[in-house]
């Protein structure tokens, strides 16, 4: 397995070298050496890396489903106003289920919480974050204002 392949797989999994090393049962310097081409992984390590790559394929599929859900909700509740938004699954986001970054046209969803809750409440989390973005796009304060709470209640009732 080539060094650039290893790095590409690690980055696609959104893992630091330290996190990747822990999952593989090796040290961080070992991963660094692999990625620089200074050393090569054992056949057992290659099998483990390929297993992690399969996990990445499943994550990509989940991201595709997430984007379809976003598109459906955008049409149904937000007048299709949320254009050019990206959805990201974040391993680092652990305090919140999601985070709206409307200035960057980005919504982050916590992979940690999704896996913990087995993807339950995904639509509710997405609606919540999309509402923050919608209010921003319409020129309103995007925080948890009274307007936000009223609109969220109305969205949940429909």
Image: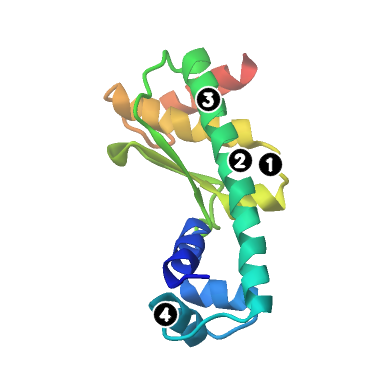
Residue density around tag 3, few if under 14, some if 14–19, many if 20 or more, within 10 Å: some
Mark whose residue sits in front, 2 or 4? 4
Disc 2 to disc 3, how far (Cα)? 25 Å
Would you place residue 107 above or below residue 81 in this image?
A: below
Tell me how far mark 2 sits from mark 4, CA to CA: 32 Å
The reply to whether discs 2 and 4 touch (Cβ–Cβ < 8 Å) is no
Q: Which of disc 1 and disc 4 is earlier in sequence? A: 4
The numbered dot on residue 146 is: none
**Between discs 2 and 3, the one toward the N terminus:** 2
Percent position (x, y) of residue 93?
51, 56
Q: Secondary structure at mark 1?
A: loop
Which of these two is toward me, 125 or 1? Answer: 1
Q: Circle 3 is placed at which residue position?
A: 152
- Mark on residue 62? 2
Q: Which residue is mark 4?
A: 37
| Residue contact at pointers 3 and 1, CB within 8 angstroms | no
Quarter holding residue 27 = bottom right
Point out the tag, 3 or 1, that comes first from the N-terminus.
1
């Amino acid at each position: 397995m080539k060094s650039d392949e290893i790095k590409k797989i690690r980055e696609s999994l959104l893992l630091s070298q330290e996190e990747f090393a822990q999952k593989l049962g090796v040290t961080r310097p070992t991963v660094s050496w692999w990625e620089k081409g200074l050393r090569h992984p054992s056949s057992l390590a290659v099998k483990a890396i390929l297993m992690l790559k399969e996990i990445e394929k499943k994550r990509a599929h989940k991201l595709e489903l997430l984007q379809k859900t976003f598109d459906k909700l955008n049409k149904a509740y937000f007048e299709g106003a949320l254009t050019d938004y990206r959805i990201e699954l974040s391993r680092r986001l652990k305090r919140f289920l999601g985070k709206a970054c409307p200035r960057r046209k980005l919504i982050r969803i916590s992979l940690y919480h999704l896996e913990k809750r087995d993807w339950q409440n995904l639509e509710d989390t997405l609606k919540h974050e999309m509402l923050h973005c919608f209010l921003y796009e319409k020129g309103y304060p995007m925080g948890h204002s009274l307007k936000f709470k009223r609109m969220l209640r109305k969205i949940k009732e429909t």
